[in-house]
Amino acid sequence: MARTFTPSALIERGIQTKFRKTIWNPFITGVKHYNLVNEGDKIAVCMSGGKDSALLAKLMQELQKHGEKRFELAFIVMDPGYSEAVRRKILSNVELLGVPATLFNSKIYGIVKNMDGSPCYMCARMRRGHLYKYAMDMGCGKIALGHHFSDVIETTLMGMLYGAQIQTMMPKLHSRNFPGMELIRPLYRVREDDIISWRDYNNLEFINCACPLIENCQVESGEGGSKRAEVKRLIRSLKKTHANVENCIFKSVHMVNLETIIGYKRDGKKRCFLDDYDDKR
C-alpha cells in the first residue's frame, strides 16, 4: 500500500530532494558561515504571511530535525491590522505548512496611517520593535527574519544609488533597543527566484503586500514605483549581458578594500583616507 504524505511532509521532502541544491545547501552554508544558530538558542521565527518567511519557517524546522546543534524554535505571526481575509489566508497557510505559530495583534497600521509622508519607514521600525518585544516575552534571544540573497544585493545598490553610501543588509545584528536580543537572516544566501520556484512547485499562495495604505504594491515582480522595484528592474537588465552580476554585487561587500576607499564610518565616526595618508609614505 502506497504511503500517504501530508502537504507539510511533502513540502519538507521537496526541500531535501528537489530543492536541496538551490535552497537547502545555500541555507546551510549561510547558517554556518555567519554562525547564525548556536547550541541552546531559542529563536523566534517571524512569519509575515509571505513566501520568504514561510520557507524560512520550514527550513528552520528541518534544521532543528537534521542539524548538529540543539536549539528551540518559536514561530510568531504579528497582525499589524490586516483585513480579515488576509488574516484567514495567513492562518490557513500556517496550518497547511505544519508550523505551530502563535499570532499576536498590534495596531501599527492604525498608527502609521495618520503620519505625514511615507509611512513605510516607521511601520518597519515599529513592526521590528513589536517582534523583538514579543520574542523576549517568550524567552527567545534571537528573531529570524526572511530577508534573502536578492534583498541583500538590492539593498546594497539602493544605498549607493539613492543613499549616497556603501552599506548592506547584515546577516546578523545585535539589537540596540533590546539588550541581549539578536536578529538573524538565515536565508542570506538563498535567491528569490529559487524561493518563487519552491512556492510554485508546491502550488502555494501567499500574500504579497497586505498593507492597506499602499495600492498596487508589486515588489516581488519588480513592478510599481518603489526604489526597490527600480533596482529589481535594473538588476534584471544587467543580467542580460552579465549573467554573474548578482554574485559580483554580493561578493563586493565581502571583499571591501579599505586602501582604496575615500572615506568610511566606524563606531559612528567618519574617517578619511587623508587621516593617515602621510604616515604611509
Image: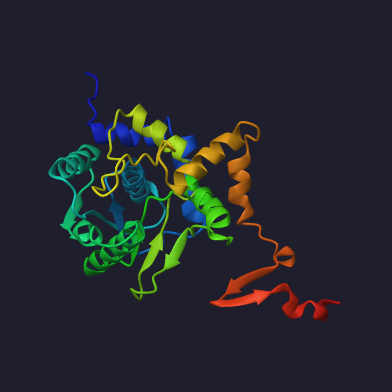
Identify whether 266 is placed above or below 208: below
Residue 149, given in percent of the width and then of the height, sits at 49, 47
Residue 105, given in percent of the width and then of the height, sits at 16, 58
Colour approach in the figure: rainbow
Task: Name the residue rendered at 13%, 44% in the picture.
Answer: 84
Q: Is residue 27 visible in this depiction of the protein? A: no
Q: Does residue 213 appear to the left or right of 25 in the view shown?
A: left
Determine the image quadrant of residue 14.
Answer: top left
Determine the image quadrant of residue 115.
Answer: bottom left
Identify whether 4 is placed above or below 16: above
Q: Is residue 150 visible in this depiction of the protein? A: yes
Q: Nearer the viewer, residue 152 or 141?
A: 152
Q: Does residue 179 appear to the left or right of 237 in the view shown?
A: left
Task: Name the residue rendered at 46%, 35% in the picture.
Answer: 193
Task: Name the residue rendered at 36%, 47% in the picture.
Answer: 56
Q: Nearer the viewer, residue 175 or 225?
A: 225
Q: Does residue 61 appear to the left or right of 269 in the view shown?
A: left
Please state, as top left, top right, bottom left or bottom right, where the N terminus lies in the image: top left
Determine the image quadrant of residue 259.
Answer: bottom right
